[in-house]
Image (spheres, rainbow, N blue to C red):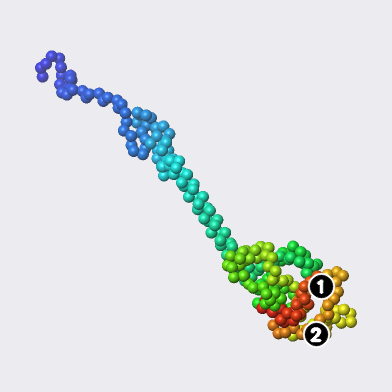
Amino acid sequence: MSGSGSREGFGSPPWDPADPVSELEDTRTIPGRGNAGQPGQPGQPGPPGQGEPGSGPDSRDDADGGEQPPPARRARKRRRRRSALVELLVLGVIAVVLALIIKTYAVQAFFIPSASMENTLDIGDRVLINKLVYDFRGIHRGDIIVFDGRGSWDLNTPSSSNIFSRFGSDLEGIVGISHDSSIYIKRVIGLPGDHVVCCNAHRQITVNGVPLSEQSYLYPGNQPSAQPFKITVPPGRLWVMGDHRAVSYDSRGHIGDPGGGTIPESAV
């Protein structure tokens, strides 16, 4: 081929050289991943927290459901306090109801107001009475019992018809601070059918002709009874006496009442 010193395959290519690619001035951010590199540079990790879920400045608000204004927070606190007070009130009512049920059917506390049972029980003592024991066994001589004297010893003492008065008395009975004058605590001396006599030649009380040995509970210096008596205990009734015989107003003091001073077993 002819030409000015050029050969086939040499010289300028039949097309223009490619235009230089300009440097990327910024990079596209992939959602949720941050920049692919340093700020403006691909392939390098970005600043900590940038684009990371849950690590941005608003992540705490997102986790807590958004920051609430002060009035909303105060309202929430008031609701919590009201809820706590309601819960305490409900628990208190349940506790009182359970205590009343226990007092009525199982165990009751009593306050000792007098010296009639000294030295077995002193003034101010509180005792818990088992209300279920006689559902499983009978009353024995020597048992200390609590009983209601209305209808036997306290003939003119009516039961209260005021619901608030009865409720207050029941609440007092829960903790053993009731001072109901018709409630007594004594020791059983004679059972139904027993022939109880005071006294034999040795100043002892006899039951069905057998002298009682009372040294273990009789108040020191007291005799079994300074007042003579003789009674056959009617069916369904009991003859009861206090341990401090010199001051105890017991069956001996109610001989003129219906039952001759005895109390009904049903009142125990």
> Residue 174: in sight, yes or no?
no
Q: Residue sitting at 56 percent across and 62 percent down?
A: 94
Q: Quadrant of the N terminus?
A: top left
Q: Who comes first in sequence, dot 2 or dot 1? A: 2
Residue found at the very far left of the displayed protein: 2
Can you say whether 229 is above or below 46 in the image? below
Quick check: 118 above or below 61?
A: below
Question: Image height check: is 90 above or below 42?
Answer: below
**Residue 83, percent from left and from top:** 50, 53
Quadrant for the C terminus, please: bottom right
Can you name the residue that lies furthest to the right here?
A: 201
Which residue type carries mark 2?
Asn
Task: Say whether residue 87 is left or right of residue 66.
Answer: right
Is disc 1 placed on a helix, strand or loop? loop
Quarter location, residue 244? bottom right
Please rate how many residues cluster around mark 1, counting C-alpha atoms within 10 Å: few if below 14, some from 14 to 19, many from 20.
many
Instruction: Where is residue 71? Give x, y as percent.
Output: 44, 42
Q: Nearer the viewer, residue 121 or 264?
A: 264
Q: Classify residue 41 as left or right of residue 163.
A: left
Say which residue appears at 32% left-offset and 28% top-offset.
26
Seen from the viewer's position, the closer of residues 180 and 197 is: 180
Q: Position of residue 152 (x, y in %)?
A: 70, 77
Q: Which amino acid does label 1 sit on?
A: Arg
Q: Is residue 260 visible?
A: yes
Q: Where is residue 236 in the image (x, y as percent from the top left)?
A: 69, 82
Q: Name the residue under label 2.
A: 208
Q: Depth check: 54 or 106 in front? A: 106
> What's the CA distance linking mark 2 and mark 1?
21 Å
Residue closest to the far front: 156
| Label annotation for residue 245 | 1
